[in-house]
Amino acid sequence: MPTYTALQAADPDVYRAVIGEMDRQREGVELIASENYISPAVLETMATVFNNKYSEGYPGRRYYGGQEFTDNVERLAIDRAKQLFDAGHANVQPHAGAPANVAMYFALLEPGDTVMGMDLSHGGHLTHGHPVTYLTKIFKFVRYKMKDVETGEIDYDDMRKVALAEKPKIILAGFSAYPRELNYAKMKAIADEVGAVTVADMAHIAGLIAGKALRNPFHDGFDVITTTTHKTLRGPRGGMILSRTEEMGKKIDKSVFPGFQGGPIMQMVAAKAVAFGEALKPEFREYAKQVVANSKHLAKFFMDHGVKLVTNGTDNHLMLIDCVASWGIGGGEVETLLDSIGITLNKNMIANDTRKPMDPSGVRLGTPAITTRGMKEKDMETLGNFMLTAIQNRSDAAAVKKLHEEVKTFCLRFPVPGITAA
Ligand SMILES: Cc1ncc(COP(=O)(O)O)c(C=O)c1O
């Protein structure tokens, strides 16, 4: 574990915040579906002197001198990313997932062009065309949805009808809150009919694809994959854009730099190289498989106890609970209650929600972080019981306090990588 002695001496206020956050991560259960714990090697790399270097451009083609080692780590990150995802080209410079999507849109579209993405209330992300983003001032977004919220099946017939009418330039797969697999081959066939480029925003499930637990959209002919590197992929906070062909990759490169960003955050590029190296190891496949096994087990546990899950199950790392149907309370109330016993998840809108985004009907939870800590199927039952007991006894302050102690004792059995006991 880093000692942070220099930080402690220089800035005790920030030092205390860092130590507080380490304790919070160690003593609580992290069920936020987009979060994870990085390895000590990735953590170390993020705090290296690569921070001090400007490297505008790409390996072998930079605007500043002194690039021997930056070129080396960026090439490592690129080569490992290509190998992990069977990609023809990788751009590892996007600062995060949202900038990766913006750079992708500007590489492939002209202002006024149309994008077809998943309806946000059915699981799509803000960058897939929410009116609060500036993207909607420049591009037009049309939607596809689930045909049946009980199974989660996408309405591919309607997708085709809308695509034929609206002629989107991009058909976008991907989501932040959808627990099922998409049929990439069907989406690709529709895109081919209307001449659209196929893009998969795999921010949430990149690690599960890299670990071969879920299908790779490139294997169904998709053109581009955008992703974050910090969720299931278990790398540093950042983004990445993969292309099936070199030709597409050239357009993406120009759009990321100089089109949209300045210098890459090179310590993060180096940390991406380390994380991708870890993801190429056989242990990572075991991890990805266990994430999905844990998620399915927890989903079944809830359903066996009368809890209503959106789409009645999961194929991936996340699930959505309809709290109103399950317990007659909103997702916000469940989030606050579980926070008070040391279990962190997030309130979430569910399909056709009648409540407001700040007080929605559901919560979203996922298993990437707890699986990194080494939890297995039987631990999912322990966690499920903690959650159901908290909800049943929510008006009994003493019972809630006692549960918090039990959660903490349970948690401390599972070490967080990079954090040892104080
Ligand atoms: C599908 C999807 N795309 C993009 C993003 C944006 O990533 P970031 O927060 O790194 O900008 C997210 C993050 O939640 C996401 O789930």
Image (cartoon, rainbow, N blue to C red):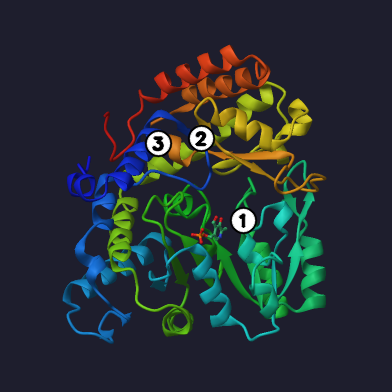
Q: Could you tell whether 338 is left or right of 279 in the image?
A: right
Task: State the image coordinates of residue 55 (x, y, percent, origin top left).
Answer: 28, 78
Under mark 1, the amino acid is: Phe
Residue that mark 3 sits on? 25
Splitting the image into four quadrants, where does ligand 1 fall? bottom right
SS for tag 1? Answer: loop
Instruction: For residue 144, say whether it is visible.
Output: yes
Which quadrant of the structure image shows residue 263?
Answer: bottom left
Crowdedness near tag 1: few (<14), some (14–19) or many (≥20) residues, C-alpha within 10 Å? many
Task: State the image coordinates of residue 387 (x, y, percent, origin top left).
Answer: 59, 24
Label ID, residue 293: 2
Mark nearer the viewer, 3 or 2: 3
- Whether label 1 lies within 8 Å of ligand 1 gets the answer yes
Q: Could you tell whether 375 is left or right of 315 in the image?
A: left
Task: State the image coordinates of residue 136 (x, y, percent, origin top left).
Answer: 69, 73
Task: State the image coordinates of residue 146 (x, y, percent, origin top left).
Answer: 76, 53
Q: Could you tell whether 313 is left or right of 107 in the image?
A: right
